[in-house]
Image (spheres, rainbow, N blue to C red):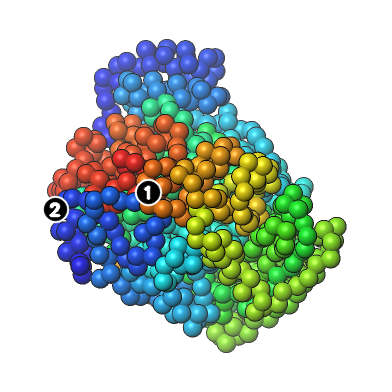
Amino acid sequence: MPSPDLHTIEKRASIVAALRKIVPGEGVIETRSEMSVFESDGLTAYRQIPLVVVLPSTVRQVSEVLRYAHENSIKVVPRGAGTSLSGGALPLADGIVLGLSKFNRVLEIDYENRCAVVQPGVTNLAITGAVQHRGFYYAPDPSSQIACTIGGNVAENSGGVHCLKYGLTANNVLGLEMVLITGETIRLGGKHLDSGGLDLLGVVTGSEGLLGVVTEVTVRILQRPETARAVLIGFPSSEDAGSCVADIISAGIIPGGMEMMDRPAIHAVEEFVEAGYPLDVEALLIVELDGPSVEVDHLIGEVTAIAEKNHSSTLRISKNEAERLLFWAGRKAAFPAVGRISPDYLCMDGTIPRKRLSEVLTGMADLSRKYNLRVANVFHAGDGNLHPLILYDANEGDELERAEAFGADILRLCVKVGGVLTGEHGVGIEKRDLMPEMFSMIDLAQQQNLKCAFDMQCLLNPGKVFPNLHRCAEMGRMHVRKGALPFPDIPRF
Amino acid sequence: MAKSPAELASLIAVGGRFELRAGGTKQGLGRPVAGATVLDMSGFTGISLYEPDELVLEAGPATSLAEIEKTLSKHNQQLAFEPPDYSRLLGSNSSGSLGGLVACGLAGPRRIKAGAVRDHILGIAGVSGRGEVFKAGGRVVKNVTGFDISKLMVGAHGTLAALTSITLKVLPAAATEETLLLRGLTDVRAVQAMGLAMQSDCEVSGAAHLPGDMTLLRLEGVGPSVSYRRDRLATLLKEFGRSDVLVEKQSRQQWMEIRDVHLLAKGRHAYVWRLSVIPSKSPEIIADITRKLDVNYFMDWAGGLIWIAVPATADASAGLIRGSFADGHATLIRASAEVRARIDVFQPQARALSELTARVKTSFDPSHVLNPGRMYKDI
């Protein structure tokens, strides 16, 4: 991370006092033991006790905290539930953690206009919980949905297993209220569609807390499809499974979800949850079709024919809701299942063009031998988003370093075949040093110029996303030199 | 005419004031760009990549929309946001280019179900106002690597960068479609009916109301599913009177006319506004306007989109139109250049947002070289 500013750390007592004036009582947390809750997020390999934690409960307090930070040049790390897998909410020793956990209310449900207005600290699943009695739900479903907040979802543009058909967070958010680092409040979008000006809503979604602090979110809610059924299909090779996926899409079918697992993942999962997965296959597909029953029946017929054409060795169609959920239980337990067979694992998140899958799997197998570490793969097959899980033991010699180098090589491979570094987990600190694999120095400079338009002093979440965040005054034409990389001050990825 | 991004970059790097032009059919959208040299983008044309089973298409901004749609239809695919053709409305000779479509961020009736251009753009390459070649995004659907600059380019009216390549997500076209037709509903009843339809699980992909005439609800998909949902929807909307059905060809024709705003294209003297508002509010917005002004109008997006033709006066009744709603935005789509120069074509913004917009413009185009003043005066 950027080296801490000692001057700020020296002023800690006065900063705490100033924050207490803005947020009275328990809203300011300053003891080391209480702050330890905030020292890390879902990327637990990195930890840092923050300068101070503030938990405002009104938009006005958020605005005053940010204005104070801006006027005094103090860094701010926004935080939702802290479930980021890329270190997006990792604190700074010289920075305020601004937690939004007190913004936990559903403000309005408007069925007539198919939307809900919620505060950013409301969990993803709680939105569905608030509207499901009328048959509605909020579509994006990241696997952390029981804990992660909608504010964090906006910051990371979270996905989930159903985003092939229903879109990512960006496609399901209609409007935001956001406080800029200057303390000014702006509104982007609303219950109406589209922006009247530049699509700043599109840029803020997925900006990893670098552009502002979201204080209210308007999301689109949908009526649940009448029915959903899943088909579980085993294949003797990942090539067959891959071409089955391509043929389903070429046939004009967009399933509600389409997930793939490789042999190591299937075995780990089956031992853990006994979902009834076949163990004698190299790849397993779960294809979920949703909509009216007549449509689902029709599409299941088509998918079955396509699977058989692609040499499927087993095929089961869920007969009832319990069986559909059982099919999913295995996939949804993939991470903890892998956690059972290895002391530690790293979860990667590259996206590739689907048809390059078998090439990437072969490359991964080669890398697995090179680094002498096992890897299990779960894959959002419909949209090309890979989650290789690299198995290692942090207590064994250099295994963590090897696992990180292995992961970086996988992401390089993803970029090489036309893919990207991160599909849904975000860049954070985890992948920032790999950004030059995908972007030129000019591409990155343009992104940083945009950052400066929102945050001139680079006070919001510095150290995340960009390998080398320049002060805005330094930004300009062609000034970022290759020699500035790699970023030297954290352990290499 | 630049033929490569590098050539384009060196042209832009010299500085000056440039008006971007690809197809040239949408020069009348937005504020006029005064005293500018035309930056001819027609060298960046053609589909450079189309992989139907990957659902991705990449093309130059000057590629005609007609060519893209023809290519996609060979594989039963489409741009799901239903690009409109405003040639009748704007008096141009074709539906224009991909670049114009993206720059103006135009989507048709399916917007309510499938999203807008912004929801289908995956990546871009272009030249910023600094004269630097840059790219953003990629060619895969799931991508959160860096800021989503591709989305920002949609609807920026060429004020941030001159795009040289655009990558879009494409989707399968529906096998068939039908439209359920209700007759004689007032605006209030029509919006209620459309609202109920949208709240159902019938997956309505178009909901429009042509006042005094028809309220239309479109269903698309595979045959058995469409018939099933049509019956279900008809039952759900029983209380709104007897319904008729438009089958495939009639349905397509009807939605094309709505998408392309044919209803207001006639009477070229009138100025045309496009209002994006909260759907349930549209009847009271229209009532407020029609009390004071003689207008023609219709609704799309279940009431969320109102098209209004107003008399061609010096201020295009901007104050009255914008005073009729609290949440949303109104854009003046058709008016004389003189009027578009004088009044706000795009919805005026609150101060903090307006200042942020200016800083964002400057972050791409510090000397205001690209389409200066197209969206807002001095931006």
Q: Which of A260 and A250 is in front in this view?
A: A250
Horizontal side of B27 relative to A196 (left or right) equals left
Residue A452 horizontal/vertical position (percent): 30, 38
Mark before the other along the chain sequence, 1 or 2: 2
**How far apart in space, not on screen, are marks 1 and 2 (Cα)?**
30 Å
**Going 24% across and 60% down the picture, which residue do you hit?**
B39
Q: What residue type is labelled 1?
A: Glu
Q: Nearer the viewer, residue B277 or A159?
A: B277
In the rendered structure, find residue B338 and report the number of the disc placed on it: 1
Badge 2 marks a residue whose secondary structure is: loop
Q: Mark 2 points at which residue?
A: B14
> Which class describes the residues within 10 Å of circle 2: few (<14), some (14-19), or many (20+)?
few
**Going 24% across and 51% down the picture, which residue do you hit?**
B35
**Going 47% across and 42% down the picture, which residue do you hit?**
B315
Residue A316 horizontal/vertical position (percent): 68, 75
Q: What residue type is labelled 2?
A: Val
Of the 4 image quadrants, the one containing the N terminus of chain A is: top left
Q: Can residue B226 be seen in this view?
A: yes
Q: Nearer the viewer, residue B162 or A291?
A: B162
Badge 1 marks a residue whose secondary structure is: helix
> Tag 2, which chain?
B
